[in-house]
Each structure stands twice: as C-alpha cells, then as structure tokens.
C-alpha cells in the first residue's frame, strides 16, 4: 500500500530552520510526501525576525481544498496560522475530515523573536481548532499562553495545564519540555481517562530552531503510516535527537 501524504499547513522560513521547509524535510526523511499549504511568508534568520505577510485567507482555503481533492492525505500537521481569519478558514476546511489525525503545533511566536499569532487568532485557535485536533503539541511557554496559567516547570504543573487544555476541547496533549530545566527532558502525553505517559531523555545543551516543527511533522508522518500514537511520539523524538546531533557544533 502506498504511503499516505501529510497535509502541512504552515508558514515559510527562508533560513530553512523552521516552518514548512523543516516540515517537508522531516517528512522526506521518513519517506512520507508533504502536501504543503503556505499561510504566511516570513523574513527571518536563526538570530533575527524581520516580519511576515499573511496569505489571503481565501487562498489558504483554496490550497487546502486542492490538497484534499488531490487525495492520499493520511494526516494533517498545522503550524503557523498567522491571523484569526486564516485560523477560521483552516477550521472550516477541516470540518469534514474527522477521519484524519490532525497534529497542531501552536506556533505563537518565533524563537528568533516576533509574534506569529495575535490574541484574536489565539482565541479562534482555542475555540474552533482545539476541539478538532487529534494531538496538540505545545511547549511550556505555549501552554502558559493558551491556558492563562503560569509556566509549568514540573510534571505536576504540566499535567495541570494539559488538563486545562483538555477542558478547552483538546482530546490529547503532548506538553514539550525542551525549554525546561534539569538533567532530564520529559515530554508529557495527557489523554483523559488514561495514565499520563512521560517520554524522557537526558537534556542536551544548546538548541536548534525548528525542533517543534520537526517533532510535530514527524508525529504526523508516522500517524499517516499507521503507527500508534505513543510509538509515533517515540519515533519522532528520535528524529529530533538525530537532527540536534547533526547540527551540533
């Protein structure tokens, strides 16, 4: 059976370190094709964010519709949404795609500086997209923004925030600990009614842009291949580690 494609909805990044370029490269590394939909054009490097221009919401919707009609979509990965209007269009476009696992990486700000989704857009994300997604993959800062709770550097705090996100309608939450502290980096998978699962590994010094994009697109790719969620997360974390090792000085 042919490998399914992943519908990737995200912004561009001319540095190639994050955004849709990183998503496509991540999927290609595991033999999965991407159906890319661009939401915004950014100007940024690894050190500096210069700004972005959003694609017209109607054009984003037209891209999504064309990708879905083209067929073969086995999963969806959502990254940068840029505006409330685009977030609303994405929600509407995916309304009849309940069978597809949707992985949402809530890109709210660039690691090189700059807001990538304003408060109006974040509210649309909370109200209209969170109830639709199969898995949400926020980092500690993003969980704090989406829940209005303080940042959670502990496992108990991460679980409390995941429970708050679940109350907003999100069925599964993977709280990423990459921006945390301590010798171990532990991502927490929370699914209501099930025991939370921690995915731990020694914390690496340094960082690389695009790790969130890599993780979420890799999970979506493995889900498209038919892998179970926990196995998909483990495989995606291994892919992130391989990238960190490849770009280490």
Image (spheres, grey):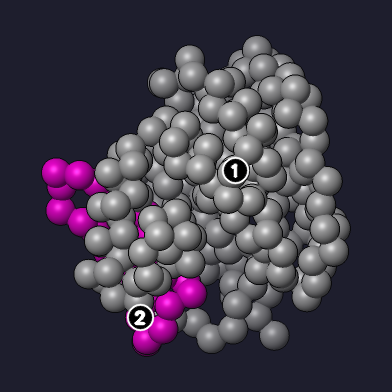
- The residue mark sitting in front, 1 or 2, is 1
Name the spot of residue 193 as percent of width and height, x first. Answer: 14, 44
Say which element carries label 1: helix
Would you say residue 220 is visible in this rendering? no
**Bounds of the magenta span?**
174-198
Query: Image check: 189 left or right of 98?
Result: left
Whether the magenta-drawn stretch holds residue 21 is answered as no
Q: Residue at x 54, y 46 (%)?
A: 122
User: What is the CA distance from the residue labelled 1 to the residue labelled 2?
Assistant: 33 Å
Name the residue beneath numbered marker 1: 121
Name the spot of residue 125 as percent of width and height, x first. Answer: 51, 40
Query: Image check: 17 left or right of 105?
Result: right
Would you say residue 194 is visible in this rendering? yes
Query: Image check: 139 left or right of 67?
Result: left
* In the foreground, 176 or 89: 89
| Rendered position, 20 above or below 205 | above
Report the number of numbered marks.
2
Q: Residue at x 44, y 54 (%)?
A: 146
Circles 1, 2 touching at the beta carbon (< 8 Å) = no
Name the residue beneath numbered marker 2: 184
Q: Residues within 10 Å of mark 1 (few under 14, many from 20)?
A: some
Q: Residue at x 79, y 41 (%)?
A: 54
Name the spot of residue 129 as percent of width and height, x first. Answer: 48, 34
């Amino acid at each position: 059976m042919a490998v399914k494609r992943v519908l990737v909805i995200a912004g561009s990044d001319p540095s190639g370190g994050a955004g849709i370029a990183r998503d496509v490269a991540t999927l290609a590394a595991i033999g999965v094709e991407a159906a890319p939909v661009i939401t915004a054009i950014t100007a940024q490097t690894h050190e500096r964010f210069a700004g972005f221009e959003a694609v017209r919401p109607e054009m984003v919707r037209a891209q999504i519709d064309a990708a879905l009609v083209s067929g073969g979509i086995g999963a969806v990965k959502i990254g940068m949404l840029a505006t409330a209007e685009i977030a609303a269009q994405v929600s509407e476009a995916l309304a009849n795609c309940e069978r597809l696992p949707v992985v949402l990486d809530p890109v709210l700000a660039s690691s090189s500086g700059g807001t990538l989704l304003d408060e109006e857009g974040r509210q649309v994300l909370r109200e209209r997209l969170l109830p639709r997604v199969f898995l949400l993959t926020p980092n500690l800062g993003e969980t704090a923004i989406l829940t209005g709770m303080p940042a959670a550097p502990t496992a108990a705090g991460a679980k409390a925030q995941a429970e708050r996100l679940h109350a907003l309608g999100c069925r599964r939450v993977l709280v990423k600990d990459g921006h945390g502290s301590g010798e171990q980096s532990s991502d927490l998978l929370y699914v209501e009614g099930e025991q939370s699962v921690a995915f731990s590994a020694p914390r690496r010094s340094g960082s690389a842009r695009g790790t969130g994009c890599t993780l979420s697109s890799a999970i979506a790719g493995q889900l498209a291949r038919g892998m179970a969620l926990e196995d998909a997360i483990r495989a995606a974390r291994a892919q992130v580690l391989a990238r960190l090792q490849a770009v280490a000085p």
